[in-house]
Amino acid sequence: MSQHVISVKVENKFGVLARVAGLFSARGYNIDSLTVSTTEQENVSVMTIVARGDNRVIEQVKKQLNKLIDVIKVTDHSELETIERELALIKVTAPSSKRPEIYQLVEIFNAEIADISHKTMTIGVKGVPGKIENFIELLRPYGIKELLRTGRISLQKL
Amino acid sequence: MKISGAEIIVKSLIKENVEIMFGYPGGVVIPIFHQIFNAPFKFILSSHEQGAIHAADGYARASGKTGVVIATSGPGATNLVTGIATAHMDSIPLVIFTGQVSREMIGNDAFQEVDVTGITRPITKHNYLVQDIKDLARIIKEAFHIASTGRPGPVVIDVPVDISNSQYKFEYPEEIHIRGYKPVYQGHPVQIRRACRLIESAKKPVVYAGGGVVISGAHEELRKFVKKTGIPITTTLLGLGIYPETDPLSLEMLGMHGTYYANQAVFESDLLIAVGARFDDRVTGKISAFIPDAKVIHIDIDPASVSKNVLVDVPIVGDCKNILKEINKIIKAPHIDQWVKKINDLKKSHPLTYENTKGRIKPQYVVEEIYRLTKGDAIICTEVGQNQMWAAQFYKYTKPRTFISSGGLGTMGYGFPAAIGAQLAKPKKKVIDIAGDGSIQMNLQELIVAVQHRLPIIIAILNNGFLGMVRQWQQLFYDKRYSHTCINFAPDFAGVAEAYGAIGITIKEHDEVVPALEKALSVKDRPILLDFHVAKEENVYPMVPAGKSIKDTIMRELA
């Protein structure tokens, strides 16, 4: 089982997301993350799908994706040099005694304090997925009350 | 000039040269039926929407054209689902119109509303919900294009009633451009040369060809390839007829109920040349023990079929016909005399056979006599189960599009409505549905359609009082516990046929088989139902038991 980042260029039409997601769900594969966004081209969206599976399974999914009429192109970014970004919002327990420590982490990670209350801080962090993982791990001891991630977007270099 | 959406649909069908439309009316498709009333094409009203779609599917398989179906929203659409899935599994081109509630009602749980595009998404090649009348003509053009090109399949167009009723100008696009859909038709020349080198150096090659050859119309090229190379050939169920089974190089069908020699040859092969076939589990048996020593060449138009179940050494994606044509230009025959001799010995030592008796009628005997009396020139449709396998085994197919059967989905109740479609496509051909007493009950209501249109279809029921294939498995693998497979309380089928206005004959004696078939073959103006009371616990052999290797093909009950 390895993680794959599949970038799917699709027609920006209703129902396309269901078609793409259906290929995964019908085979019982879980999607780790999925983002959909518009692109520089009118009527074209890109879905970035992070999924786990053995290579043969992923190979089959890519072929099935290619068969969808509304899919224009499928690229496996796990095999390419890419630039990846992800954004997370983390609400962490932050009594005043702990705030300096947390603030230090925020600075090191180039994160941003999005909101602050008597008991909590909400921090936004962006970057490559590994960085976000690390940041979350370092915040965990303070008590994470809520955590949301956008899922990654991935752009091919060159 | 503006016309209604309903009229746009009918005018588009005329542009697509539709000859026959199958279907059933209902509330939200009344506007479309209002236009169909005067349409120049024939409309065949079924008794049940499932009958309509199987008929359209049978029409498509017999003619090679796209089948066209219409049904209403809600239950009309859901009744089509089995037929859509049947066509999808076997790559049959269909364009299906379903009515939908008006746009402002969608999502409100309106009367007869279902999410048709949602339900049919995984069983169609593509589907559309028309949301703007401006798109309607283009969508129809795209649907026919998508359904019939590449690896064909069913396309659903869901039409809200207010779209049918609104007005727009009619312009049928001459050309369409779908950037995400560009099937590859030409095989890659490098791959073709690699394949030829493998073939020329093979010692024990076998051709394994399937329904893709039928769809591509590649049977002449395939025959030429076999003639040039002398390589033995086996076909899948859906490939029956692409190569004459009467030819010495034919190994007939392979797989779970394929011939012993086909399965052994494939198992022992050092090169398997797959043409328009997809390594279905009913073909391969236990996949890890399918072809232990063989390299694989796979010619198929669907890249997703390549290396799906079996890893392929030389894939050639494209149209079978084009690729075989290229191969035939350069291929030289391999030296395989010993291999062919070995296979011929296998054919002699393990023929396809059954014990014919003068007592109870043997189902295989009925099929053999159908073959003999029609001189192999009929179109055979089948239901699913033992009847289907005997029809595949004991009738020798020599032409493509003469065996019509639900292979992938295995839909009981498919054969008879499909026979109606096939007979409408080929009015001069003898069309025979080889049925079981279980399957025929699933769509027997369509008999009235055959009577109405005076179609001389023969229904040959191999009536053994059982759901025979399941009973066979229960006998062999479930301690003979015949749980709910004994159906010896069937109606008098001949009487049912007569009540519909067809001819019904019950045949209980061996000696009555031939006279009944002769009589049935002489009828020209109505369907004839032959109810053959056959041996009750006859089994289909050879057989590859579930989960076993094809080398473990058994010829009869194990003691």
Image (cartoon, rainbow, N blue to C red):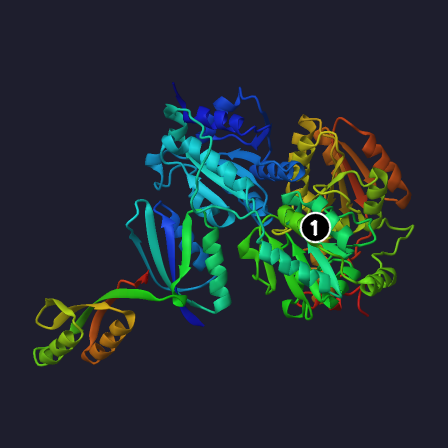
Instruction: Give above or below for B414 relative to B252.
Output: above
Label 1's element? helix
Q: Position of residue A95 (x, y in %)?
A: 10, 77
| Rendered image quadrant of residue A7 | bottom left
Chain letter, disc 1 residue: B
Q: Is residue B480 visible?
A: no
Direction from residue A22 to residue B441 in the image, left or right: right
Asked whether residue A114 appears in the rendered view, the answer is yes
Q: Residue B191's spot in the image, x, y percent?
A: 60, 58
Q: Is residue A70 above or below residue A25?
A: above
- Going by the image, does B559 lie left or right of B23? right
Q: Residue at x 43, y 33 (%)?
A: B138
Q: In this rendered view, identify the residue nearer to me: B514 or A147.
A: A147
In the image, B257 versus B487, the foreground residue is: B257
Local crowd size for mark 1, using a 10 Å CA cut-off: few (<14), some (14–19), many (≥20): some
The residue at which mark 1 appears reads as B328
Which is nearer the eye, B222 or B214? B222
> Where does residue B480 sit, x and y in percent of width and height?
73, 64
In percent of width and height, residue A120 lies at: 13, 72
Left or right of B496? Residue B103 is: left
Please tell me which residue lies in front, A93 or B437: A93
Q: What residue is shown at x 37% (from left), y 53% (from top)?
A: A9
Q: Quadrant of the N terminus of chain B?
A: top left
Residue at 71%, 57% in the rendered image:
B207
Q: Amino acid at mark 1?
A: Asn
Which quadrant of the rendered structure holds the C terminus of chain B? bottom right
State which quadrant residue A119 falls in. Answer: bottom left
